[in-house]
Amino acid sequence: MTTVTASVASLRTAPVLERVTGGLLLGFVGALQVSIALAQILLAAMLISWVALRIQDRTRPAAPRFFVPLLAFAGLTLVSTAFSVDPMSSLIDSKQLLLLAIVPAVYDIARGPRAFRVIDVIISVGAAGAVYGIVQYGLLHYDNLGQRPQGTLTHYMTYSGVLMLAICAATSRLVFGTRDRIWPALIMPALVVALALTFTRNAWIGGCVAVGLLFVLKDFRLTALLPVVLATLFVVAPDGLVNRLTSTFDAQDPANQDRFAMIEIGARIVADRPLTGVGPNMVPMVYEQYRPDYAVNTVNPHLHNVALQIAAERGLPALAAWAWFVIALVVSLFRMFRRAPAATDGVDSEQRRVLTAAALASTAAMLAAGLFEYNFGDSEFLMLFLVLITLPFAAIRQTDASAAHT
């Protein structure tokens, strides 16, 4: 084969591989709200295809600036693993760090107009999952704390978390878009109702904070709608949901009492091992020795608080790296939101604003819900969150010759 022939073959292969990689990204994002097994298979295929594309183009991977503190967080997690009370078990749990590769992959694959297609897939699949959750509640007796709607996912907590992120994306389309708003407007009631029916208070709080932030960013006067919507839901909601909501403010509620015990347990662990923590996934193993007498549960899988969990299992340096990541992300997103750049590469300023608003709302939701749940450690939630926060950075990248073929 001559050099000219090889060059022509390479040019023909590049668009095909680019389209395959883009299709795998859309499939992976859709599967995240359907099946963790399918999502992991598609993620692996997407990453392999993406690496092959980068090798073929002879280009190095890139990432937004917030990826640097994420790498620092990963490194400090491995340090914590080395000093874990059970290093091998912690090392196995640390495989979740591989999910951070989603950031550079999405940053590269979702350039230009493809970023907006990704968010449309998230909203559409979220709507389908919401309808299924409503069916579970209404027809299949998933209508109590013992059996809550979980969609096609394995746990109601994961289901409520991804619904919360889908609401962030749909609300951003509805509030900041000026065209094609019929679809998000039609599905929004299903998303809100499905989230309410999960009985999951941390996701309720996260969703309210995220929507409130979007209203403030658009027009502060819109925040007046939030209490109206909440009051309406309170009036029409079944007694079980109303009781669940009011229990949030009951200090004698067993779940709330156990939350106070977990705060004390986390503080004791951090006091004993401030630099490296007890190791990833080791909190259940040491729970009993730090458990106060008033704690309700004998053991818990985690401390139901993102910052507290990170500090206890990975140490204060890892918590500082995570906080650095959050601050760097929020600062970059706010700067991007205020800049509202002009249209290039098929992505106009309105679409970029929608993507940026969705990323800001998702971050606010993660932080607010993370006060009461370790959502940053939930693989499905983390993967969808990483996609959403990377999309606005990917959208503003100049598309090269190979990325132009979609």
Image: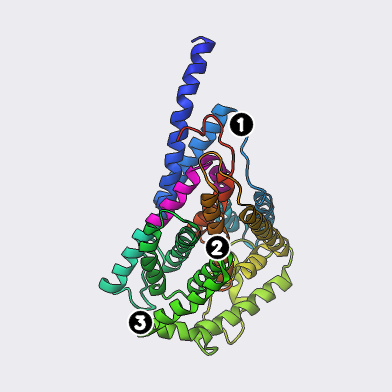
Of the two numbered discs 1 and 2 on the same chain, state the one appearing first in sequence.
1
Residue 369: x %, y % from top left = 54, 70
Q: Which residue is mark 3?
A: 236
Single out the mark in the foreground, 1 or 2: 2
Residue 317: x %, y % from top left = 73, 61
Q: Quadrant of residue 220?
A: bottom right
Numbered tag placed on residue 59 in the rendering: 1
- Looking at the image, do the residues carrying marks 1 and 3 touch, with CB atoms under 8 Å apart? no
At 58% across and 44% down in the image, what residue appears? Answer: 396
**The disc labelled 1 sits on which kind of residue?**
Thr
- Neighbourhood count class around disc 2 (C-alpha, 10 Å): few under 14, some 14–19, many 20 upward: many
Q: Is residue 216 left or right of residue 38?
A: right
Q: Secondary structure at mark 2?
A: helix
Residue 388: x %, y % from top left = 52, 54
Distance between mark 3 and mark 2 Cα atoms? 27 Å
Numbered tag placed on residue 183 in the rendering: none
Question: Is residue 33 covered in magenta?
Answer: no
By secondary structure, the bulk of the magenta-drawn segment is best described as helix
Residue 285: x %, y % from top left = 58, 69
- Neighbourhood count class around disc 1 (C-alpha, 10 Å): few under 14, some 14–19, many 20 upward: few
